[in-house]
């Protein structure tokens, strides 16, 4: 398996492990606009590829629960710094693949 990369991304604030295949990830906190019946805003951890392009986000908003004051302080600093960056629409991360899944099923049905 030549040029195969397997990375384990550790979210250093929440100590959660996320496994990505063949990718290099970095992350930051960003404000996300939720376009429901009423517009609301939350802060999420977003992940970038090796070119610095945001590819996806953590489904859950940032939780300020922390195991110590140092971690809480770090989270708050990152949270406040997210307010200085552009707001991202949640719709940019749409993961509704039902149409493409149905198209794939139709292709296999005709084989």
Image (spheres, helix red, strand yellow):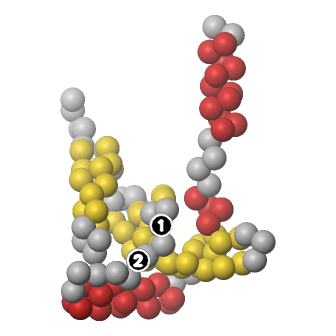
Pointer 2: what residue?
63
Front in this rendered view, residue 23 or 3 = 23
Q: Is residue 53 visible?
A: no
> Which quadrant would the N terminus be assigned to in this image?
top left
Front in this rendered view, residue 3 or 32 = 32
**In contact (CB < 8 Å): disc 2 and disc 1:** yes
- Residue 67: % across, % down: 23, 81
Q: Is residue 21 above or below residue 17?
A: above
- Residue 50: % across, % down: 36, 59
> Which quadrant would the C terminus be assigned to in this image?
top right
Front in this rendered view, residue 42 or 6 = 42
Residue at 25 percent across and 84 percent down: it is 71
Q: Is residue 87 above or below residue 18?
A: below
Image quadrant where residue 15 sits: bottom left
Residue at the extreme top: 111
Q: Residues within 10 Å of mark 1 (few under 14, many from 20)?
A: few
In the image: residue 99, left or right of residue 54: right
Residue at 37 percent across and 69 percent down: it is 27
- Residue 20: % across, % down: 32, 48
In the image: residue 83, left or right of residue 108: left
Q: Residues within 10 Å of mark 2 (few under 14, many from 20)?
A: few
Q: Is residue 70 above or below residue 58?
A: below
In the image: residue 20, left or right of residue 30: left
Q: Secondary structure at mark 2?
A: loop
The disc label shown at residue 60, or none: 1
Q: Secondary structure at mark 1?
A: loop
- Residue 12: % across, % down: 24, 71
Residue at the extreme right: 37
In the image: residue 89, left or right of residue 23: right
Residue at 73 percent across and 69 percent down: it is 36
Image quadrant where residue 93 sits: bottom right
């Amino acid at each position: 398996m030549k040029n195969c990369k397997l990375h384990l991304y550790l979210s250093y604030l929440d100590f959660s492990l996320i496994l990505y295949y063949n990718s290099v990830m970095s992350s930051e906190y960003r404000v996300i606009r939720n376009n429901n019946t009423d517009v609301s805003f939350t802060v999420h951890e977003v992940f970038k590829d090796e070119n610095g392009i945001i590819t996806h986000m953590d489904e859950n908003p940032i939780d300020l629960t922390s195991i110590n004051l140092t971690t809480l302080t770090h989270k708050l600093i990152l949270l406040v710094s997210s307010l200085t960056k552009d707001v991202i629409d949640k719709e940019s991360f749409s993961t509704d693949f039902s149409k493409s899944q149905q198209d794939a099923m139709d292709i296999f049905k005709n084989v």
